[in-house]
Image: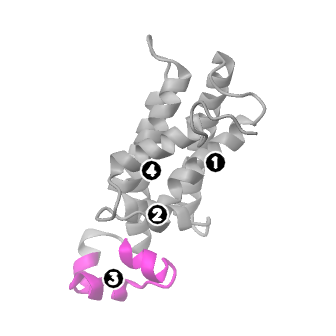
């Protein structure tokens, strides 16, 4: 997947993949039908766990609010992105140029829709403000998480828990210091 991310999916040939992996092209074809199958596997890697996280949060559970489940989705989305960063990076670059890419984009729309519904439920509970459309909030939340592909490094200054906590706190509690009164 990293070669797709470095060179671009369209610009990467099976020969390039074979060279990168130290294999022959026939050896790769022994395991996969072609480059598009590799793309499909990578996109599924990026989407499967996130889909499970969002699906779980979308289900009402006794003792939890939509707001709590929404915060959990944001925190866990960071964890999924970090664990699957090369695949998520590739997912964020697809544009719908093939049936595999179109299917991935459809799955991303499903995630946005479920997250927007969860935001709407949190608004109904009175936990979130009602002057920002839930679909926009969903896009902004995922946008904040997805921006990690541009700068986050597992061996960098911040561990996953710190980043997940910071994004969740900023998204739901803001940046203002508690008790601070602007003049």
Q: Which mark is residue 140?
A: 1
The magenta span reads 1-28
Q: Is residue 157 above or below residue 14?
A: above
Tell me if label 3 and label 4 are in contact, CB under 8 Å: no
Nearest to N terminus: mark 4 or mark 1: 4
Numbered disc in front, either 3 or 4: 4
Quarter of the image containing the C terminus?
top right
Query: Which residue is outermost to the front?
Result: 183
Q: Is residue 63 above or below residue 110?
A: above
Numbered disc in front, either 3 or 2: 2
Q: CA distance from mark 3 to mark 4?
A: 23 Å
Q: CA distance from mark 3 to mark 2?
A: 22 Å
Q: Secondary structure at mark 1?
A: helix
Numbered disc in front, either 4 or 2: 2
Nearest to N terminus: mark 2 or mark 1: 1
Q: Which mark is residue 149?
A: 2
Tell me if label 2 and label 1 are in contact, CB under 8 Å: no
Nearest to N terminus: mark 3 or mark 4: 3
Q: Is residue 22 above or below residue 102?
A: below
> Toward the viewer: 60 or 28?
60
Q: CA distance from mark 4 to mark 1?
A: 18 Å
Q: Secondary structure at mark 4?
A: helix
User: Circle 3 is placed at which residue position?
Assistant: 17
Question: Which residue corresponds to the image point at 49% horizontal and 85% vertical from the top-left?
Answer: 11
């Amino acid at each position: 997947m990293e070669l797709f991310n470095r060179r671009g999916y369209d610009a990467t040939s099976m020969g390039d993949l074979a060279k990168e992996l130290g294999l022959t092209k026939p050896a790769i074809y022994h395991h996969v039908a072609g480059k598009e199958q590799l793309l499909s596997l990578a996109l599924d890697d990026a989407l499967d766990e996130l889909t499970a996280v969002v699906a779980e949060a979308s289900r009402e559970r006794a003792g939890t609010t939509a707001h709590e489940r929404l915060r959990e989705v944001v925190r866990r989305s960071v964890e999924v992105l970090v664990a699957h960063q090369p695949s998520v990076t590739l997912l964020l670059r697809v544009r719908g140029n093939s049936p595999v890419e179109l299917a991935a984009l459809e799955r991303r729309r499903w995630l946005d829709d479920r997250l927007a519904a969860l935001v709407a439920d949190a608004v109904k509970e009175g936990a979130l403000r009602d002057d920002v459309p839930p679909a926009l909030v969903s896009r902004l939340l995922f946008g904040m998480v997805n921006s990690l592909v541009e700068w986050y490094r597992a061996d960098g200054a911040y561990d996953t828990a710190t980043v997940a906590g910071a994004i969740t706190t900023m998204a739901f509690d803001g940046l203002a210091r508690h008790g601070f009164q602007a003049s």
